[in-house]
Amino acid sequence: MMRTVKDVSEITGVSIRTLRYYDEIGLLKPTELTEAGYRLYDNKALEKLQEIMFFRELEIPLIDIKKIMDNPNYDKERALLAQKSLLEQKRNRLNGIIELITDVMKGVNTMSFGVFNNEEAQKMVNHTLSCMSKESLDEQVQKYGSMEKYKEYLISGFANERATADLLKWYGSKEKVMEAVMQSTGSVEEIKQGQDENAKIYKQFMAAKEAGNMDMAHSAVEMLAENYKTMFMLDNARNILIDLAKEYSSNEKLAEVTDKQYGAGCADYIANAIKIYYGL
């Protein structure tokens, strides 16, 4: 079935002017011309136009698209797979940006990098100590020699620039960090519930790995993000998950422990799934 340039424009959303330009530069020639000079396109031409549109979504210049498609070794199926992968990365990158924008609209200050003063650090440490079980507290006091030395160790953590930077990146502001710490109850039951949910999610990652199912992995990343938000009282889990992916990729000992618990290649698979989800 032949279609006019007007028909093709209405079907694809590509303007008549653009279709004429594609003809002029030899990127997409009409299947045939009528005696009156009207352009006509068959289904094969429409398929080629669709491929061009995919390339344009990736912001590839027209001259480069023409070179790619004119190459005698051009493999349409391989090109579509590559386009699909790149467009998924673009989508995931946009999803991450949309999440951040949503949080900013909710009032999450993603660029507040204040430093904890001694009073704030003391307040958070005292609350943390009050939530610890006597058994755990006695164990740490014995390890550090005294309660004061253990408190000094905990307070020093808030003076560690790298650790503090990570906290501020995860929570968005020092106020959010303090709020999360002060709301923490230290409940063993809540911690176990979060750990059990994590284990369930990691098993889904492994099932996705075995099946080669990226949709299942995508869902597992979303579930992990929600669980982290609950466990650590985060507004957005993007940064903490990205840091987790970096740790799995660089920390062999952590990866080894994870693989031993959930199966060979688990840590690497989760790291890659997180990176793909956020378009990294």
Image (cartoon, grey):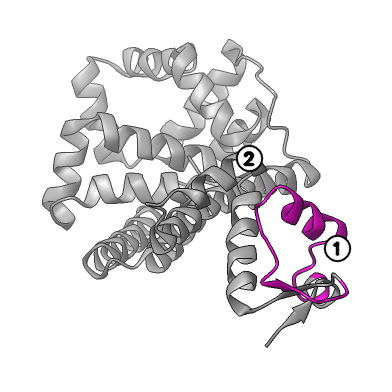
Does the rendering let one see residue 210? Answer: yes
**Magenta span:** 9-36
Q: Residues within 10 Å of mark 2 (few under 14, many from 20)?
A: few
Specify whether residue 237 is painted magenta: no
Disc 2 residue type (three-letter): Ile
Q: Is residue 235 left or right of residue 249?
A: right
Could you give the CA–CA distance between mark 2 and mark 1, rounded to whole angstroms? 19 Å
Of the numbered discs in the image, which one, if any, rests on residue 213?
Answer: none
Image point 62% across, 14% down: which residue?
Answer: 115
Identify the image quadrant of residue 2: bottom right
Q: Picture coordinates of residue 100 (x, y %)?
A: 67, 43
Of the numbered discs in the image, which one, if any, rests on residue 16?
Answer: 1
Q: Which residue is mark 2?
A: 63
Specify whether residue 22 is painted magenta: yes
Q: Nearer the viewer, residue 89 or 4?
A: 4
Q: Is residue 266 left or right of residue 126?
A: left
Q: Is residue 158 left or right of residue 111?
A: left
Q: Residues within 10 Å of mark 1 (few under 14, many from 20)?
A: some
Q: Picture coordinates of residue 137 (x, y %)?
A: 30, 32
User: Does residue 217 sit above or below 149 in this rendering?
Assistant: below
